[in-house]
């Protein structure tokens, strides 16, 4: 199974649309984040070396490095999400013919669910970091690429929200109440912050457009 | 240049991140819509033939057909957006050595800008149709795939918003005031409707999750 980033774009979308559970929403949320990071890098590159933007060159070089780092991580999370999902499926298929086997299976399921929650948690948190970066480049980047920065802002927010749903759906089956509560707090913090930064970025873009 | 959907996913993101202006935000907005349609089709397929969902089979078959239609159109718009952008660049490079040449060039630019506004307008309108479909499948689709429907809802909204910015940036250089006003009205109508349907879909998903 797994996800192959070397597959043609068209086939990737085809497999998403198919009955196969992976790549599903978690992988697509990470891909949305990776595409948003790609647009962010493009805006940085269209600003660096451009007349009229001399004062922000160094800053844009730093933003580009940060954006490429986030793009790499988010691209990695596309496949990691599918692997974490497959891990849950594997745990569910474990032997349950004896009380001992049942117990190991239940523990393996709980462990796999935690991994399946933690991958989209990372997607959401990288998405939030990206949104902060988009806000910066929307303020100071090449004005001719503002609509690209805007698409990046909307997609990064979609990545954060989409990732959150994928955390939630796994938390729903996790029994350790403390763990679930801790994860929900992180989710709420990142959701609130993401919406705030997204509004700021969209406001700047509307102003400069 | 154009956009090749047969290129590896990884290379596609790489070209987005590069200095090349295409594929830019307009193509990525269409891709976000196509991915949202892919997830919508997946949820339909995971509902059709599933125990407990017998009553919604026919409806889900119709939704699947509609979703695949939208996916096809949105996939087409990925390349169309890049072509429309290239058309504007070509018009800008036209001869302007005589008053007559200048006039033809100006007219060609205006025509190319209209095309470059109309492609993302279609992306936004297909994105809105898709959101309505996501709302339906969120209400009646397989509850185990609700997070996938949720990611589809967030990405479809990002496609609508992202497309709108790409319409706007082209309208800003179009001189025919009536045309611009008509397009802005369509934009506002589809933006308002999209936000409304997105809220409904997200509400249903939170309730059922």
Image (cartoon, coloured by chain):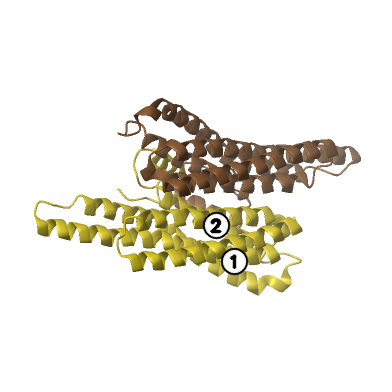
Chain colours: A yellow, B brown
The residue lying at 50 percent from left, 52 percent from top is A32
Q: In this view of the protein, can residue B209 be seen by the observer? A: yes
Q: Chain of mark 1?
A: A
- Quarter of the view holding residue B110: top right
Q: Which residue is mark 2?
A: A156
Q: Secondary structure at mark 2?
A: helix
| Side of A51 relative to A112 (left or right) | right
- On screen, A74 above or below B101? below
Residue nearer the viewer, A116 or A183: A183
Q: Where does the N terminus of chain B fall, quadrant-wise?
A: top right
Closer-to-camera residue (A96/B22)? A96
Mark 2 is surrounded, within 10 Å at the Cα level, by few (under 14), some (14 to 19) or many (20 or more) other residues, namely: many
Local secondary structure at mark 1: helix
* In the displayed structure image, the side of residue A102 where residue A181 appears, left or right: right
Residue on which the image places disc 1 = A133
Vertical relation: B193 (above or below) A92: above
């Amino acid at each position: 199974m797994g996800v192959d980033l070397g597959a043609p774009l068209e086939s990737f979308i085809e497999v998403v649309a198919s009955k196969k559970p992976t790549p599903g929403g978690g992988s697509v949320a990470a891909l949305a984040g990776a595409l948003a990071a790609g647009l962010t890098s493009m805006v940085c590159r269209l600003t660096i070396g451009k007349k009229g933007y001399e004062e922000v060159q160094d800053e844009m070089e730093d933003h580009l490095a940060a954006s490429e780092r986030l793009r790499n991580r988010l691209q990695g999370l596309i496949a990691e999400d599918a692997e974490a999902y497959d891990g849950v499926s594997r745990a569910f298929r474990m032997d349950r013919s004896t009380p001992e086997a049942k117990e190991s299976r239940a523990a393996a399921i709980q462990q796999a669910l935690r991994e399946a929650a933690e991958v989209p948690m990372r997607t959401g948190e990288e998405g939030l970091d990206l949104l902060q970066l988009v806000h910066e480049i929307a303020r100071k980047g090449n004005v001719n690429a503002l609509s690209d920065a805007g698409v990046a802002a909307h997609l990064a927010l979609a990545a954060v929200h989409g990732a959150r749903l994928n955390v939630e759906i796994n938390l729903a089956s996790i029994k350790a109440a403390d763990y679930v509560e801790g994860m929900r707090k992180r989710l709420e913090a990142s959701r609130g912050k993401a919406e705030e930064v997204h509004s700021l970025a969209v406001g700047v873009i509307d102003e400069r457009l």
